[in-house]
Structures are given as C-alpha cells and as structure tokens.
Image (tube, rainbow, N blue to C red):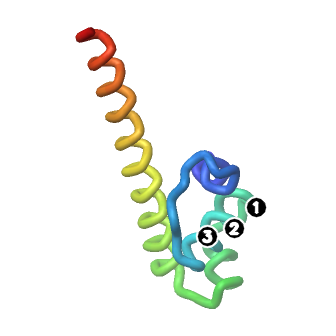
C-alpha cells in the first residue's frame, strides 16, 4: 500500500534510489526481503534500514497532512 501511494503520486515525498528500489521490490513486486537485497547487492539489514526510512518519511507526510486537515476543519468550525 505504501509503495502504491508513493508511485501513484499521492504521497509527494522524495526518496533515495535504494529506497525507491526497496519499495518497488518489496511493495510492488512482493519479493522477499532477501531476494531484493540480493538483487540490489546489499545486505538484508541495509535493505531493512532503507525500507524503515522510506516508511518513516511516508508516515511523517501522512501525519502532517492529517494535522493540516484537522486544523482546517477546526478553523472552519470557529467561523
């Protein structure tokens, strides 16, 4: 789901090339973590760190978007 949100442009967040590759392999191709790490030529723990960073970026963006939505609803309620 996270990868689909990113690649359809619904979450406009920038990622490193490894983070994009990780999202493609794990999120869109549904490959095992070990297979994606092997494809990218990196260790599994590095791949998981890239995935973690990407998910944190998306989570931060979603949280910020939700906060803006609540703020706008509250400001409409005040008027």
Q: Could you tell which of marks 3 and 2 lies nearer the N-terminus?
A: 3
Q: Position of residue 42 (x, y in %)?
A: 57, 88
Whole-angstrom CA distance, mark 2 to mark 1, is: 5 Å
Specify whether 67 is left or right of 53. left
Q: Are marks 2 and 1 in contact (CB under 8 Å)?
A: yes
Q: Which mark is residue 8?
A: none
Q: Which residue is mark 1?
A: 29
Quarter occupied by the C terminus: top left
Q: Nearer the viewer, mark 3 or mark 2?
A: 3
Q: Relative to residue 65, is residue 19 depicted above or below?
A: below
Q: Upstream in the sequence, badge 1 or badge 3?
A: 3
**The furthest residue to the right:** 29
Q: Do tag 1 and tag 3 residues touch (Cβ < 8 Å)? A: no
Q: Is residue 10 above or below residue 53?
A: above
In the foreground, 26 or 62: 62
Residue at the spot x=71%, y=65% of the render?
Answer: 31
Measuring 51% from the left and 66% from the top, which residue is drawn there? 14
Question: In whole angstroms, how far apart are the C-alphas of marks 1 and 3?
Answer: 12 Å
Determine the image quadrant of residue 30. bottom right
The residue labelled by disc 2 is 25
Numbered label attached to residue 20: 3
* Image spot of residue 27 (x, y percent): 66, 57
Label 2 Cα neighbours within 10 Å, binned few <14 / some 14-19 / many ≥20: many
> Crowding at label 3, few (<14), some or many (≥20) Cα neighbours within 10 Å?
some
- Report, in whole angstroms, how far the alpha carbon at label 3 lies from the one at label 2: 9 Å
Residue drawn at x 54%, y 54% is: 12
Query: How far across and how far down the image is residue 71, in percent?
Result: 29, 27
Q: Secondary structure at mark 3?
A: helix
Quick check: 32 above or below 2? below
* Outermost residue to the left: 78
């Amino acid at each position: 789901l996270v990868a689909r949100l990113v690649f359809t442009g619904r979450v406009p967040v920038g990622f490193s090339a490894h983070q994009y590759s990780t999202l493609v392999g794990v999120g869109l191709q549904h490959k095992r973590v070990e297979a994606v790490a092997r494809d990218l030529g990196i260790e599994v723990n590095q791949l998981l760190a890239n995935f973690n960073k990407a998910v944190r970026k998306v989570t931060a963006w979603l949280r910020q978007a939700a906060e803006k939505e609540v703020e706008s609803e509250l400001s409409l309620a005040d008027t």
